[in-house]
Each structure stands twice: as structure tokens, then as C-alpha cells.
Amino acid sequence: MLLDIKGLCKSFGSVVAADKLDLAVAPGEALGIIGPNGAGKTTLFNLIAGSLAPDRGEIRFNNRDVTAISPHQRCKLGIGRSYQIPQPFESLTVFENLLVGAVHGRGLTERAAAAPCADILAPTGLIARADIPVRSLTLLERKRLEMARALATGPQLLLLDEIAGGLTEVECRALIETIKDVHAAGTAIVWIEHIVHALLAVVGRLIVLDFGRKVAEGEPRQVMASAEVRQIYIGIEA
């Protein structure tokens, strides 16, 4: 397995965000994760990426125990992530933002990073915007840049945190096609999203979290047809 998580636990006082979670991701797989607000989805990403330390449990990446190593070390090993709210360097251009990701995330020199960063621009739909400051981008372009910055670190595993949030239906469809292209190139994806139809267009397996527990897992449409999952998602159009 590319990612193998066993017995992961994390609490914040009386709030349990991860309750003995087991999760595995194969190389090149696309896994979707859904759950109501407070289910522990972003906490799980923070634990995988290293910005939070678990109370108990083990995280292995490429058969290496990474539970106790820093986010920077995990990034260099091949774990890249996007954030729910993009926070690019506003005064830099799109291309310069990618260079920062490649230099600091992969340890490349700026000269060595130029070619791989240029290769990311076309599949992420940013090639026409490469030389403009980020402050001029639309929301869709910012979402694309958030993913492109993560790709600039050279990940084997890409964690996408609600990257479709706030987009129109047309923009969401465009982003889905970009994510499909990234996945088709061989990058494993774990995608947290409330816009379930977007997930169903990409992922081959779906996990449902609730109060830090895994309550369902399997083929996406079968999972969404589950009575328990539908109960969890009452009031949320899937």
C-alpha cells in the first residue's frame, strides 16, 4: 500500500476527531471521503500531512513509518495537499508560486524546478495565467493554483480538501476534468468533498466518516445508497 493507517486516534478534549481509524490507499487510487461538518475529515488530513500528531495509531507511507516525522519531511517523501481556503503568495505570479512549492517541497534548485513547474501549468489549466500576479485570479483559477502548488511538490499522494467548494456548476465540471487528468497521470488522490456528485465522477472508492469513525466504505454509489449514510446526510443534497 502507498498509505496505510492503523488505529489512528485524535481527541480535542471531549471531542473525538479520529476514533481508531484504519485506512489504506493503493498507488494510483482515487479515494473519496465524505461526512458532515465535524466528522473529522480535515483532522484526518492534518494527521496524514503531519500538522497534527495523533494520540495513538500509526501512519505508514511507502512502507515507512511517518507517524512522528515533520510535515516538511512527509512532503519530500511524496505527500502533497491542498487547503480548503487557498493561501497563495498574492504578490507572486502563478509560475513563481509553483516554483516555491518545488524548491521548498522537493528540495530542488530554482533552475531545476523550472521545467517540472512549467509542465504542471497546462494540465491544471493555468498556462495562459502563468505570468500574472495571483491577486488577479478568479476563484476557479485560485482552486486550480492550489492544486498546482501541491503538484509542484512532486507528490505520489495528493490530498484534496474541499477543493470544489464555492464553485459554480460549470466551474466544478471544469475542475473535475482537471482532477481526472491528474489522476490519469498516476497520482493517487484522497479527496474530501461535500459536493458528492463531483466525487462520484472521479473516485473508485468512498469512505464516510461521522464523529471520527468510519461508518461506511466501498463502491461509491452503493455507499451513497446505504440507509445509514442517507441518515447522516439528511438535508444535504447528494
Image (cartoon, grey):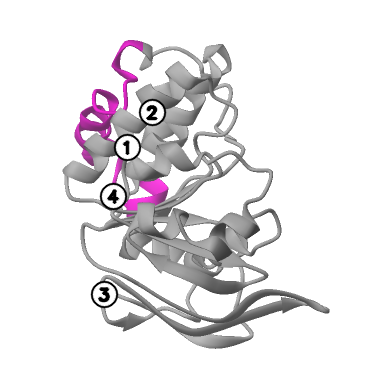
Q: Are marks 2 and 1 in contact (CB under 8 Å)?
A: yes
Q: Which residue is mark 3?
A: 62
> Dot 4: within a 10 Å radius of its alpha carbon, few (fewer than 14), some, or many (20 or more) residues?
many
| C-alpha gap between disc 2 and disc 1 | 6 Å
At label 1, which amino acid type do we have?
Answer: Ile
| C-alpha gap between disc 4 and disc 3 | 15 Å
Q: Main secondary structure of the magenta part?
A: helix
Viewer-side label of 2, 3: 2
| C-alpha gap between disc 3 and disc 1 | 23 Å
**Quick check: can you spot residue 54?**
yes
**Quick check: can you spot residue 93?**
no
| C-alpha gap between disc 4 and disc 2 | 20 Å
Viewer-side label of 4, 3: 3
At label 3, which amino acid type do we have?
Answer: Asn
Q: Which residue is mark 4?
A: 154
Q: Which residue is mark 1?
A: 179
Q: Foreground: 53 or 109?
A: 53
Residue at the right extreme, as displayed: 14
| Residue 198 rendering spot, x and y as whole percentages | 42, 37
SS state under label 2: helix
Q: From this view, report whether residue 218 is shown above or below residue 101.
A: below
At label 4, which amino acid type do we have?
Answer: Gly
| C-alpha gap between disc 2 and disc 3 | 28 Å
Q: Which residue is mark 2?
A: 175
> Dot 3: within a 10 Å radius of its alpha carbon, few (fewer than 14), some, or many (20 or more) residues?
some
SS state under label 3: loop
Viewer-side label of 3, 1: 1
Specify whether residue 24 is painted magenta.
no
| Residue 38 rendering spot, x and y as whole percentages | 71, 59
